[in-house]
Image (cartoon, helix red, strand yellow):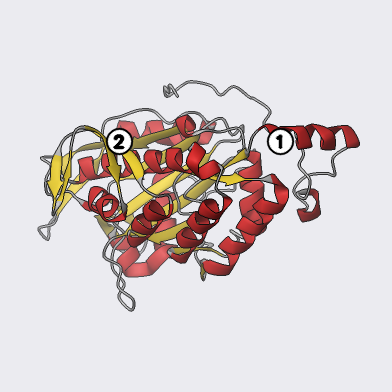
Amino acid sequence: MSASGGAPRSGRDVGSDSVDGLAELGLEPAPSRGARRQAERRRRRRLAVVVVTLAVLVGVPVLAAVVGAGYLVRLGASFGDRSTTIAGALPEYEGRPAADDDGAVDVLLLGSDTRVEGESGRSDTIMLVRLPADRSSVEVLSIMRDSWVEVPGHGEAKINAAYSWGGVPLTVQTVEQLLEVRVDHVAEIDFEGFRAMTDALGGVVVDSEQPFTAGPHEFRQGLNRLDGDAALAFVRERYSFADADHQRVRNQQAFLTGLAQGVVSRGTLTDPARVSEFVGVTADHLAVDASLTPARLLELGWSSRGLTPSSLHAVTLPVAGGGTSADGQSYLAIDPAGLEGVREALRSDEVLPDAAP
């Protein structure tokens, strides 16, 4: 997908079809007899591909294959049974950005490779995933964990400190005030989930920008087929790179693209058991806000069914070099012009502007 900051969206209608079973969930009106026959023919020709972001399943784009509405419902039920709900994830406070009334959806993904039960920890991955109103793309905005921002009630600090001080609610508020956009849903995953998801798919192919070594794993420039252990090393590693976390963010984005492509591969689409296993292991490592119910998942997935892995557009919030705080912390300063460009794109529901991290 080509992208530029001012590119308008196509306005393409992606909600005109109906599928048996969704009407029972209140997501679509009951189809006519002609529409029912047309849907049945479509099911016989190919599997329907429903786009649900990893911010919906794990916070970043992933594609769930379905065979008819009944299978889709079973996947939603599996997700609901195995995922965890985050109490009070979406805080109400004075000055909170208003909800978007045009149909765009913003989901905050939080991930960490250092989460320990009973400890507050810090969030190592922060991504805002947007489904625009016309569902023409999946926009993924990565925020560097050392970005220096205003944390409500605590003053200026690295953005990942918000999680340590106030968990998911304070992190949501910090991101909302930084980007001036309302977060509709939030999902939190531990990096061990990446290992499980990769193995559930039988491996994931990623395109690495550069060769590097992480523990026992060696990655060449270009395409690499990863098992679960290698995938975990690929998304965690930062010490091998001159630009450290910058490259780590790019590697995480490359992994998510490979994951989406793996889910819609022929081997996965023709194997319902593999898709079910993938959704199940994803949910095992996932916590979501209370409003991200199975019915909401199905609604978002069905409205985004026209998307493909190539629809994913990932960028990083621009930074303007490093700095040192009064107490000696090294941080990344956010580029003011770049931040305003991102805010304007979110306000206008346009493609996020490309910028190198």
Name the residue carrying label 1: 44
Residue 124 placement (x, y as % from top left) = 28, 56
Q: Which residue is mark 2?
A: 336
As drawn, 177 above or below 168? above
Q: Position of residue 21 (x, y in %)?
A: 77, 50
Which quarter of the rendering shows the N terminus? top left
| Kind of residue at badge 1 | Arg
Q: From the viewer's side, name the closer residue of 3 and 232.
A: 232
Question: Crowding near pointer 1: few (<14 within 10 Å), some, many (20+)?
Answer: few
Q: Is 85 positioned to the left or the right of 113 in the image? A: right
Q: CA distance from mark 1 to mark 2?
A: 52 Å
| SS type, badge 1 | helix
Residue visible at 48% across and 43% down in the picture: 263
Q: Earlier in the sequence, mark 1 or mark 2?
A: 1
Is residue 63 something that shows in the picture?
no
Number of callouts in the render?
2
Quick check: can you spot residue 349?
Answer: yes
Q: Judge by depth and name the residue closer to the eye, 82 or 134.
A: 82
Q: Which mark is residue 232?
A: none
Residue at 39% x, 28% y is 353
Q: Which residue is found at the position 46% from the left and 30% from the top? A: 310
Using the rendered view, name the quadrant where residue 112 is placed: bottom left
Report the amino acid beneath label 2. Pro
The local crowd at label 2, few if under 14, some if 14 to 19, many if 20 or more residues have their Cα within 10 Å, is few
Identify the element where label 2 is drawn.
Answer: helix
User: Would residue 258 be found to the left or right of residue 129 on screen?
Assistant: left
Report the front residue among 219 and 128.
219
Residue 255: x %, y % from top left = 34, 43
Where 236 falls versus 139 (above or below)?
below
Rendering coords of residue 357 (x, y %): 25, 36
